[in-house]
Image (spheres, rainbow, N blue to C red):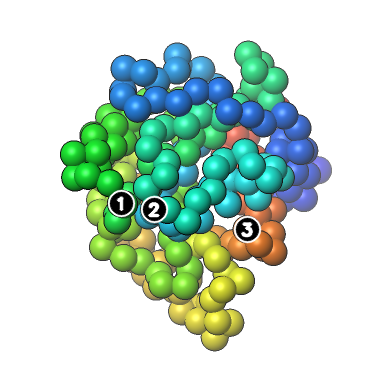
């Protein structure tokens, strides 16, 4: 099989996330970021979209990323290494939730500035996965994030969450709605995944997609 064969990529993605994965760094300000290093993939989404649950499912951990019923719990950029620290091929970045959060406007403004600076000035950052609640579809804050990513010329891909809580009759409607919204956006990746952190549906495809991106960027893993 070639290195871009789907079966090979699926297995490489599985092995990648079956190995070591741990928290290494938190940054509340742009000057507090870790030194540039391995390829980075970031995860963004509205508060309470299920971002921490997805990260835990992706890495096969129960508590890699902290989950909470309180919107706005992630208040900084949290960095995780995949692989042995110092030799890791990949870093995952958990970004602050956008949209509603039970905090002050000043704090939200601070988070927004941090995200803007990170997206526009971080050379190892290869893609942002934007999580959207599959039960409700796109909301204005999601479209604002798309605008920011397009203006930053940052590649991004939409991941729908909570498929297990979405009616089967609405699944294709949700997917088509997102595809149509992304069709004319210059930085958007065309593939949209629908996932469930509860059942694991779509997680294998997400791992495969990350492995493909790493291969395309020449990362050895």
Is 91 on the left-hand or right-hand side of 45? right
Residue 109 visible at all = no
Which secondary structure, mark 2? loop
Q: Earlier in the sequence, mark 2 or mark 3?
A: 2
Q: Residue at x 66, y 62 (%)?
A: 198
Residue 45's mark? none
Left or right side of 16 for 160 = left
Q: Quadrant of residue 14?
A: top right
C-beta proximity under 8 Å, tags 2 and 3 = no
Q: Is residue 133 visible?
A: yes
Left or right: residue 90 versus residue 77 is right
**Mark 3 surroundings: few (<14), some (14-19) or many (≥20) residues within 10 A:** many
The picture places residue 165, in percent across and down from the top left corner, at: 56, 73
What is the spatial separation of the Cα atoms under label 1 and label 2, in whole angstroms?
A: 6 Å
123 or 84: nearer the eye? 84
Which of 42 and 73 lies nearest the eye of the viewer? 73
Above-or-below relation of 45 to 199? above
Mark closest to the chain's N terminus, 1 or 2:
2
Residue highlighted by disc 1: 102
Q: Where residue 148 sits: x, y (%)? A: 26, 45
List the residue tagged with mark 3. Answer: 197
Label pair 1/2, CB-CB below 8 angstroms: yes
Q: At 69% across and 64% down in the image, what residue appears?
A: 199
Q: Quadrant of the N terminus?
A: top right
What is the distance, in whole Å, between disc 2 and disc 3 at their CAs?
18 Å
The Cα atoms of the two marked residues, 3 and 1, are separated by: 24 Å
Q: Which mark is residue 71?
A: 2
The x, y position of residue 189, in whole percent, is: 44, 52
Secondary structure at badge 1 equals: loop
Looking at the rendered image, the disc whose residue lies closer to the viewer, 3 or 1, is 1
Q: Vertical placement of 173 versus 44: above or below?
A: below
């Amino acid at each position: 099989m070639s290195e871009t064969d789907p079966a090979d990529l699926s297995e490489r993605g599985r092995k990648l996330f079956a190995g070591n994965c741990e928290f290494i760094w938190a940054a509340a300000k742009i000057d507090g970021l870790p030194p540039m290093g391995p390829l980075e993939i970031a995860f963004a989404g509205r508060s309470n979209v299920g971002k921490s649950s997805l990260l835990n499912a992706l890495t096969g951990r129960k508590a890699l990323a902290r989950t909470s019923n309180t919107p706005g719990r992630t208040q900084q950029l949290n960095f995780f290494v995949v692989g042995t620290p110092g030799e890791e091929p990949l870093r995952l970045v958990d970004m602050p939730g956008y949209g509603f959060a039970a905090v002050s406007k000043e704090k939200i403004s601070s988070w927004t500035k941090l995200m803007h600076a990170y997206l526009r000035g971080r050379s190892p950052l290869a893609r942002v996965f934007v999580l959207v609640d599959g039960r409700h579809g796109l909301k204005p804050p999601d479209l604002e994030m798309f605008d920011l990513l397009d203006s930053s010329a940052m590649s991004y891909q939409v991941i729908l969450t909570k498929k297990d809580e979405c009616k089967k009759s609405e699944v294709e409607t949700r997917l088509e709605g997102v595809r149509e919204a992304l069709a004319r956006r210059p930085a958007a990746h065309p593939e949209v995944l629908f996932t469930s952190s509860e059942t694991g549906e779509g997680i294998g495809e997400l791992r495969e997609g990350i492995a493909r991106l790493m291969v395309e960027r020449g990362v050895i893993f």
